[in-house]
Amino acid sequence: MRLPLLVAALVAVPALAACTENAPSSGGGAGESDAASARTVTVRSTDDACDLSATQAPAGTLTFDVANAGTQVTEFYLLGEDGLRIVGEVENIGPALDRQLVVDAPAGTYVTACKPGMKGEGIRAAFTVTDSTDAQQASADDQQLVEQAQANYDAYVQDQSDQLLVRTEQFVAAYEAGEDDRARAIYADARTHWERIETVAESFGDLDPKMDAREADLEPGQRWTGWHRIEKDLWPARAREDGRAYTPLTEQQRTTYGDDLLANTRTLDRRIQQLDFTVDQIANGSRGLLEEVATGKVTGEEEYWSRTDLWDFQANVDGARVGYEGVRPILEQKDPDLAKRLDQRFTELQTLLDAQRVGDGFTPYDDLAPDEVKALSDAVNALSEPLSELTAAVLG
């Protein structure tokens, strides 16, 4: 689906959550080298431990070099002091793989977490960012670009959240009234607004599991609520495939789940309207949204019942592109070659997605040929590599 005109206008102004791999290092004297070293923390994640080379660092651009020495896929998070707000994250780190998280962290108290198996609260520890007088200062021109990028992205996310709330109200009203055809027609469009800002929504650790948990990812004892619980009820034929038993929800249960989703959406919108984003959060969010594509949408795991995965795919790419284009003026000054590569890779991926358009929507996931899935996956991977360098480049 196309971005609203407001979004296009925001990202067209020229004066305007990261995982980076093989990020280029900048030259500098011994003092700069010492400062960079102090802000680089190695993380060794195993199946039962999360060992950091330091538990504090000076304020500024921090780099966490994460190595998975365990047997399970893991994640690494830098969380706010409350242990809920996600400052930065890298996900899906396979055994024997290394990844980087780059964040711009002000002085304060934080929490680090490794998540072997990518479930539960993970292995947590306190982390302190101390006051610093040698943090890199942006030039006046750079600062103007930074402030414009932040203002544009703030407006974009708030607009998407507002549209999400409106469409969710319509969706819940139709679902609770038993108007299933209308609810199914609204579902993918409403989800588009969620998926465009998914990494922002995920930063609220108390809301995301209630709103977007998939049945296959539930932990023992976890109550299943949110979009996908209702999705399963709206596509019962898929739920009964392969002899699986499924009992439709009662009218009272529909009201309970619908009201719960709407209440959580309203809470999310209130929180989002108060947010201000930093440049590293914008760049990290762009990378994170593409990672969502790679781990859920291109595999057909996200919308298991409705098979509307390509709607989500496009929405994640929309959000990733908006984040990237917001910081692109900064990147052009610091690494124009990377900007050109990203422009090309975004275009190549969008061309493949456009080929799957059907009217105002997309081909159902089950109708994709294996070679089409592979082509999409290859294009996502081709974009992921340069996008992983974005945060380090704009902060460098």
Image: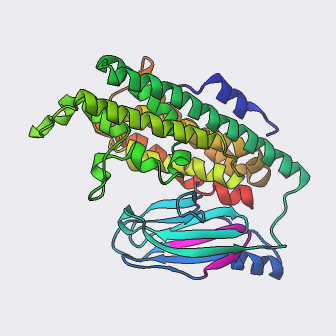
Q: Identify the main secondary structure in magenta.
A: strand
Instruction: Confirm whether residue 304 shows in the render.
Output: yes
Residue at the right extreme of this rendering: 140
Side of 11 relative to 147 (left or right)? left
Residue at the left extreme of this rendering: 243
Q: From what the image shows, is residue 88 above or below residue 320?
A: below
| Residue 255 painted magenta | no
Seen at 85% across and 46% down, the residue is 144
| Residue 65 painted magenta | yes
Instruction: Confirm whether residue 348 shows in the render.
Output: no
Residue 187 locus on image (x, y percent) = 39, 27
Side of 287 relative to 291 (left or right)? right
Seen at 52% across and 51% down, the residue is 204
Residue 286 locus on image (x, y percent) = 59, 47
Seen at 51% across and 43% down, the residue is 198
Q: Quadrant of residue 97?
A: bottom left
Seen at 36% across and 75% down, the residue is 47
Image quarter hosting the C terminus = bottom right
Residue 118 locus on image (x, y percent) = 39, 62
Q: Nearer the viewer, residue 26 or 104?
A: 104
> Which stretch did the figure color magenta?
54-66
Q: From what the image shows, is residue 26 above or below residue 394?
A: below
